[in-house]
Image (cartoon, rainbow, N blue to C red):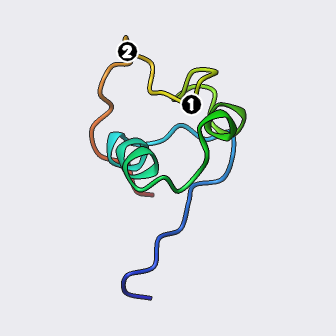
Amino acid sequence: MKGRFIISPAGYRLSDTLRFLIICHKIVPGRERYVKWPFDFNSDGDIYPEKWLMGHVAKA
């Protein structure tokens, strides 16, 4: 599945990389980002300015 991007399910916290990819590539519309990932995006769909960087996603 090379080159295919799969979005994390709603309700999960996103890695820094995923947050920036979602915004830069306009994968999900602004206000819908907040509905799906309220921990990562504010009600306008922007990354919270006070959000601490999370680093790499832990793999199980």
Q: Between label 2 and label 1, give the one nearer the viewer.
A: 1
Q: Are marks 2 and 1 in contact (CB under 8 Å)?
A: no
Q: Residue at x 38, y 18 (%)?
A: 51
Where residue 44 sits, quadrant-wise, is top right
Q: Residues within 10 Å of mark 1 (few under 14, many from 20)?
A: many
Query: What residue type is disc 2 on?
Result: Pro
Q: In which quadrant of the rendered image does the N terminus lie?
A: bottom left
The residue at the far bottom in this view is: 1
Q: Residue at x 53, y 37 (%)?
A: 13
> Which structural element holds mark 2?
loop
Q: In which quadrant of the rendered image does the C terminus lie?
A: bottom left
Q: Residues within 10 Å of mark 2 (few under 14, many from 20)?
A: few
Compute the Cα span from label 2 to label 1. Answer: 12 Å
Q: Residue at x 27, y 38 (%)?
A: 55
Picture layout, residue 42 above or below residue 36: above
Picture layout, residue 19 above or below residue 25: above
Residue 41 lies left or right of residue 1; in this view the side is: right
> Residue 46 in the image: x percent, y percent?
48, 27
Where residue 11 sits, quadrant-wise, is top right
Picture layout, residue 39 above or below residue 49: below
Q: Which residue is mark 2?
A: 49
Query: What residue type is disc 1 on?
Result: Gly
Residue 28 lies left or right of residue 23; in this view the side is: right
Q: Residue at x 37, y 11 (%)?
A: 50
Residue 42 lies left or right of residue 35; in this view the side is: left
Q: Which mark is residue 54?
A: none
> Which structural element holds mark 1?
loop
Q: Which mark is residue 45?
A: 1
> Residue 27 in the image: x percent, y percent?
53, 56
